[in-house]
Image (cartoon, grey):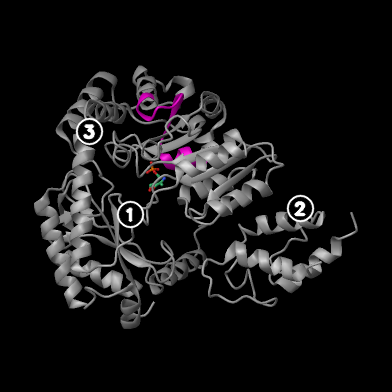
Amino acid sequence: MEEMKDIILEYVIEEYLEDEDEVLTYDTPLISGGIVDSFSMVSLKRFLELKYAISIPDDKASPEAFDTVNSIVDLVNEFVGKK
Amino acid sequence: MAYSNKIRETYLEQLKGIQDAGIFKQERFIHSSQAADIEVEFPTGSSLKKVINMCANNYLGLSSHPDVVKAAHEGLDSRGYGMSSVRFICGTQDIHRELENKVTEFLGTEDTILFPSCMDANAGVFEAILTDEDVMISDRLVHASIIDGMRLCGALHDTFKHSNMDHLEKKLQLHADKRLKVVITDGVFSMDGDTAKLDEMVDLCEKYDAMLFVDDSHSSGFIGTTGRGTHEKCGVMGKIDIITTTFGKALGGASGGCVSGRKEIVEMCRQKARPYLFSNTIAPVVVSGVLKVLDILLANTERRDKLEKLTEYWRKGLTEAGFVLKDGDTPIVPVMLFNAKLAQDFSKDLYDEGIYAIGFFFPVVPNGAARIRTQISAGHEIHHLDKALAAFIKVGKKYDILGKSKQEIIAAYGL
Ligand SMILES: Cc1ncc(COP(=O)(O)O)c(C=O)c1O
């Protein structure tokens, strides 16, 4: 099975990069780096919830928790299997 | 005193920040009616200058048309100046409903409701028809007033990349479980002048059982062979569930807007849309003017045909002169300069040559996509465009950008 962090990275690249040449790593700051605005964070949250059958409470879905692919993986892991 | 020095300082600091960023907006006072030839006081206090207006949304040249002015006078005489009431108390005249019916006929929809402005239509419509069980999926370049309207609505919001139909389809699949889905787009995008792919969007909406919303503010009156809008151009009249548009641009240019579309949606707005419920509607004098505008447009297509020819002439002239344009066929013709300072300097030099056209740069358009946005009007004549073209060429030579590619301009001026 594809690793979670690759699935999320791929989604972020597909979803938010307009320019094919831009490089994105697991540690690229997404929100503080201006790649994902807080408005579009909603769709990322929804993608994660549907994909991993979890529910992330709004107070956990902070801009900090969503700032890099690595931190998103940590967040998702907190909830996987807990439902 | 509640307005302490500390409060004043807070604002002065923010205003200075805007000034330092070079994005402080300043008005230019026009001392004549809106038209192709105007007299402008700029900077404030300087003597009046006669210039050709290349940046009004006066696409059909009807803003000061004698028949429209006359109709407005008659409306003023027969229906008075103000209503002193919102629509549902005692602020509705026969002519308000007459205008709603005429817009319905013009756009080929089921029903129409007037709003004080299209900003208000966009601000009110989503909250009136959607709940938190629903989803709004919008193009990433929709107008600011739509973004505000979506913010006021409790439904989930998601976006798709500009005019990217594959991405839109993915989003429709992602949100398949939602009760109601609305796909949201501008008809013609105001900054780039490109047209939404409404035919493909209608197909996708039918496939995934979603409604389609189009803001046709920069299309109503002149896009499509009889000027009905983007839905006419794309061959999908009768298939758009919600159209919003303004009377503040091509359709006389005074003010006012509307939501036009499915009967039930219009009725929901009449029951629930807050800008309709809590703000006075369009004044009788303006309603009378718009009624005349629609009569003119229903009688023949002369004005939009002329606009189409002038637009072709203008695009061809600029292209042959060696400017980089955004592709398209609408009267919004952006001349790309990429660098923000170059766009500002270029606009200033054009003004000295008697041409009024404004530079747009970040945050209004993306970083590195600065431009002069020109807008053609049926009120222009060929001699206006020839004079404007000569000025563009003169200034273009000064900055040595004629015949230069995007890469070459960026290499010379930076992003
Ligand atoms: C696409 C679009 N929608 C809505 C509006 C707002 O129109 P109004 O002036 O009627 O509020 C504008 C005007 O700038 C616009 O460009």
Residue highlighted by disc 3:
B301
Q: Quadrant of residue B12?
A: bottom left
Find ligand 1 in the image and state its quadrant.
top left
Q: Which residue is drawn at 28% across and 58% down?
A: B27
Give the class, few, some or many, for how many residues have Cα within 10 Å of label 3's Cα (few <14, many ≥20).
Answer: some
Left/right placement of residue B223 relative to residue B241 reads left
Is residue A65 shown to the viewer in this render? Answer: no
Figure quadrant of the N terminus of chain A: bottom right
Q: In this view, does B273 lie above or below B38?
A: above
| Label 3 within 8 A of ligand 1 by Cβ | no
Give the Cα separation between the discs numbered 2 and 1: 39 Å
The correct choice, above or below, for B344 with respect to B273 in the image is below
- Expressed as whole percent of the image width and height from the top left, the position of residue A54 reads 82, 55
Q: Residues within 10 Å of mark 1 (few under 14, many from 20)?
A: some
Q: Are marks 2 and 3 in contact (CB under 8 Å)?
A: no
Segment colored magenta: B105-123
Q: What residue type is labelled 3?
A: Thr
Drawn side of residue B137 relative to residue B238, left or right: right
Calculate the distance from the C-alpha at mark 2 to the C-alpha at mark 3.
51 Å
Give the label on residue A50, or none: 2
Q: Mark 1 points at which residue?
A: B328
